[in-house]
Image (tube, rainbow, N blue to C red):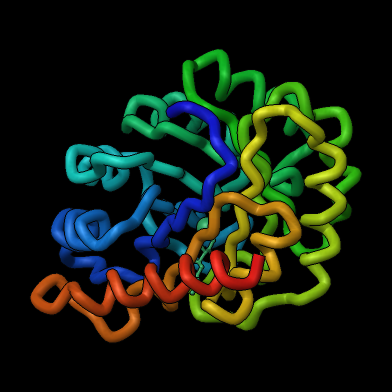
Amino acid sequence: MTFSRTLKIAPSILSADFANFGQEIEAVEAQGADWIHVDVMDGHFVPNLTFGPPLVKAIRPHIKTVMDVHLMIAPVDPYIDAFVDAGADVITAHVEAGPHIHRTLQAIRAAGCKAGVALNPGTPAETVDYLLDMVDLICVMTVNPGFGGQKFIESQVEKVRRLRAMIGDRPIHIEIDGGITPQTAPLMRAAGADVLVAGSAVFKGGSVANPAPYGENIRAIRTACDTLV
Ligand code: DX5
Ligand code: ZN
């Protein structure tokens, strides 16, 4: 993973067919996905449950790009090694998930993974002030985490602009997660984001048997960003 600020579209498999993750991932990568976003939920930190390390490990061989694991779980620390073992390239933990985000990020990097920190919509940008030299990615949640298909929270555009200024020339990705569509994506690209997670907007209308809509949906987001930035 070499660092760059080029636009990356990261389809979230939360919107894929849960009975067929391997083929869904291969289809969406063939259709132009840059990263694969993997949402882990515990039914405690967020009001929804998805899957854990064994599933993440099982899908790893199907991912040729970057496996971007978003942990919406608390506590995080007892599970870091299991997600590293599962083959994650990036592991992102929430700043709200516990009192020791600094320790969590240290542990992720020490285990050889890229470390990400995620901020809920109500959490100020300044929370990451003292974490900037220990993160590879900041994930700005543009919905309250837990479910796909929610409405984009506009106030987060300003947060991204602020984070972009705080980051300066540090090699830190800014990732946006939630409600990304061809309408909302350009706002975030212009504000300084480089990784756009999109679940429903990428998977809608397509399937493993009919993957072309995945490509059209990805291109629609990309084109919207290229024309408006
Ligand atoms: C929400 C998840 C997102 C979700 C995005 O808690 O972290 O990754 O899949 O879904 P859309 O793009 O449908 O808002
Ligand atoms: Zn996510």
- In the displayed structure, would residue 40 be above or below residue 148? above
Image x and y of residue 184, in percent = 63, 76
Camera-nearest residue between 40 and 91: 91
Q: Residue at x 68, y 64 (%)?
A: 188
Q: Residue sitting at 79 percent across and 46 percent down?
A: 164
Residue 153, by quadrant, is bottom right
Residue 188 versus residue 81 in the image, above or below: below
Residue drawn 41% across and 61% down?
12
Q: Residue furthest front?
A: 227
Where does the image place residue 109, in percent across and percent down from the top left?
57, 19
Horizontally, residue 35 falls left or right of residue 18, namely: right
Q: Residue at x 74, y 40 (%)?
A: 98
Which percent across, then down, holds residue 160?
Answer: 77, 56
Q: Is residue 144 visible?
A: no
Instruction: Locate the C terminus and report the quarter of the image it occupies.
Output: bottom right
Nearer the observer, 71 or 150:
150
Camera-side residue of 204 and 54: 204
Quadrant of the drawing holding the N terminus: top left
Left or right relative to 147: residue 229: right
Instruction: Judge left or right: residue 209 versus residue 206.
Output: left
Whether 55 is drawn above or below 108: the answer is below
Q: How many marks?
A: 0
Q: Position of residue 218 (x, y in %)?
A: 38, 68
Observer able to see residue 31? yes
Q: Is residue 216 left or right of residue 95?
A: left
Which residue lies most toward the top here? 110
| Residue at the far left in the pictured view | 209
